[in-house]
Amino acid sequence: MIADFTTMKRKQELRSFYRARRESLLPEARKLQSFRVEKKIFFNLPEKGYVASYYSIKYELNMWHLNERLASEERLVLPFTQNDFSLRLYLVKDLEKDISVDDKGIPAPDPQRCPEVEPDKVKAIIVPGLAFDMDNYRLGYGKGCYDKLLAGLDNVMKIGVTFDECLTEKLPHTENDVPVDIVLTAEKSLP
């Protein structure tokens, strides 16, 4: 149990570190890296089927162009965070009409407008992270939302995305942490 406490404490320290690192990037650098990562994602996506992305907030890599394209193809699936921090996925066809702000202040699909999509119907999922390591483990915000979603999705391509400055050699992880299949940054691609 002490190791778990130590791991959790270290993860919290790293969250603060990588948040600060991400926030210190100039807006132009964030925009350029977002563009480069989106371009890499296009080349890694299956040609058909639903793709779960995310609605970028604050200092995350911006997926707006990718999301617009997927929505126009009726392939865009976005997460809605439940009160228990599990994620439900919804098909979004119009980024302006189908998005509302949830009770946590996060832009999310409107469940009244958007049909729900079962996670195993998705061909690929784009997973944001505060940081990723060389073993494709992710450091998220600490609620386990994506780990709960990714657990058991063996036939779904899991694509982790982060800024170059947030890629590190090794992150602490537990048995509940689910690695992604590939990690993309503006400069690197990890299989």
Image (cartoon, rainbow, N blue to C red):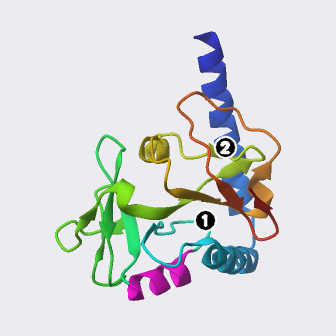
Residue at 32% in and 82% down = 93
Q: What secondary structure is marked by label 2?
A: loop
The three-letter amino acid code for the residue at tag 2 is Tyr
Q: Which residue is mark 1?
A: 59
Q: Residues within 10 Å of mark 1 (few under 14, many from 20)?
A: some
Residue sitting at 62 percent across and 44 percent down? Answer: 179
Q: Residue 12, percent across and down?
A: 62, 35
Position of 24 with respect to 126 (left or right) is right
Residue 64 appears in the figure: yes
Asked if the stretch drawn in magenta spans residue 151, the answer is no
Q: Which quadrant, please, contains the N terminus?
A: top right
Amino acid type of disc 1?
Tyr
Choose between 45 and 82: the one closer to the eye. Answer: 45
- In the rendered image of this protein, does residue 172 appear above or below residue 97? above
Residue 67 highlighted magenta (yes or no)? yes
Q: Which residues are magenta?
A: 63-73
Q: Is residue 77 above or below residue 150?
A: below
Q: Looking at the rendering, in which quadrant would you find the C terminus?
A: bottom right
Q: Is residue 106 visible?
A: no
Q: Nearer the viewer, residue 46 or 142?
A: 46
Which percent across, then down, holds residue 163?
72, 63
Q: Quadrant of residue 174?
A: top right
* Picture coordinates of residue 150, whole percent (x, y): 47, 47
- What's the residue at 52%, 40% (across, down)? 142
**Residue 31 appears in which quarter of the rendering?**
bottom right
In what element is the residue under mark 1?
loop
- For the residue carrying disc 2, how many other residues have a C-alpha within 10 Å: few (<14), some (14-19), or many (20+)? many
Residue 85, picture quadrant: top left
Q: Which mark is residue 137?
A: 2
